[in-house]
Amino acid sequence: MKPFRYETATDPAAAVDLLSREPRAAFLGGGTNLVDLMKLGVEVPEMLVDVSRLPFDEIAGTDDGGLRVGATVRNSTLAVHPVVRERYPALSQALLAGASPQLRNLATIGGNLLQRTRCTYFQDVGKPCNKRRPGSGCPARSGVHRDLAVLGASQHCVATHPSDMAVALAALDARVHCVSVEGTRTLPVAELHRLPGDAPDRDTVLEHGELITAVELPPPAQGARSAYRKARERASYAFALASAAADLRVTDGTVEHVRLAFGALAAKPWRARAAEEALLGRPATEESFGRAVDQELAAAEPLRDNGYKIPLARRLAVALLTDLTGDHAGGAR
């Protein structure tokens, strides 16, 4: 690990001011991803601004019946919060499906959203990688890409986003609050991350020095139920091969409200808007779910070794939606 300066932020304004004046500085939260990448030489910040002690550690209800989660709330805390478990079960399930208990105790909500891809070429500084060093190439396309993207990739990058939590947040229409020296702004979680295009080194739409302060969940849709499902190679502590989160309300056998997002298929949580549009007003049957998901996944462009993700994601989503129509379909959440 190379030498770096370390500063502890005393308030949000000081934190964003410090970082904005240092082009090679980074915010430090739980450090569960950033410090690992520094050890590998992938990240080489000249200064870390520790934001873990800023007053962003509260979970509180909002005036409209939603929930605001501070950026430094720990993953383990949010996963077992009674309001989250009762009203946003997809989020609790996604958090508990991610990482180990030890990592969840340290990782923060803001850091979870900003964690970087686990593509092996990105993590190996001895190999080319457009995400780590723009213009150097993407050997993953013809090399080891079994775990990588089938949706939204480009000739420059086929990395996937690793967060489980972000997939659930995208399906639940959560929004991210940010602050910078320019002021504050709020944007949907589904629009926070970028597809690679010709600039795969940029994972999100955030500008340098922009700090996530909170995530806000809207009130649950009346009568809807949500859940998260993940396929991985072992029962614990593994990143998803594919995952899905859904929020569904069915009345008299008809889909009245649906939100669906996929994980591990793209460089961002993939909000399945084509499938959602296809399902609204349609019978809540396995056949309808399958047809809608097929419409969404028709855009997939698998490489040599990752085509299995398409039927895997289809089965996950159809099973998830079918389960959500169970005995309590249409009932109050």
Image: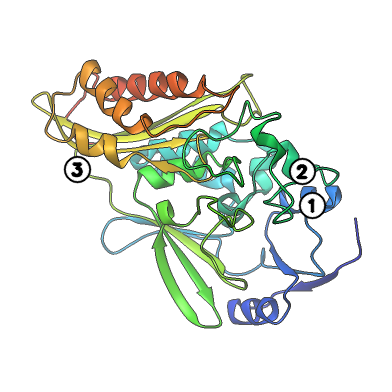
Marks 1/3: CA–CA distance? 45 Å
The image shows residue 186, relative to residue 249, as above or below, that is below
Residue placed under numbered mark 3 in the picture: 222
Query: Which of disc 2 and disc 3 is earlier in sequence?
Result: 2
Residue 101, picture quadrant: top right
Query: Which of disc 3 and disc 1 is earlier in sequence?
Result: 1
Looking at the rendered structure, the kind of residue marked 2 is Gln
Where does residue 207 sit, x and y in percent of width and height?
56, 70
Does 165 sit left or right of 98 as displayed?
left
Q: Which mark is residue 42?
A: 1
The N terminus, quarter of image: bottom right
Residue 11, picture quadrant: bottom right
- Label 3 crowd (10 A; few <14 / some 14-19 / many >=20): few
Looking at the rendered structure, the kind of residue marked 3 is Gln
Does 226 sit left or right of 31 as displayed?
left
Where does residue 257 sit, x and y in percent of width and height?
20, 39
Name the element at disc 1.
loop
Disc tally is: 3
The image shows residue 332, relative to residue 133, as above or below, that is above
Residue placed under numbered mark 2 in the picture: 123
Marks 3/2: CA–CA distance? 43 Å
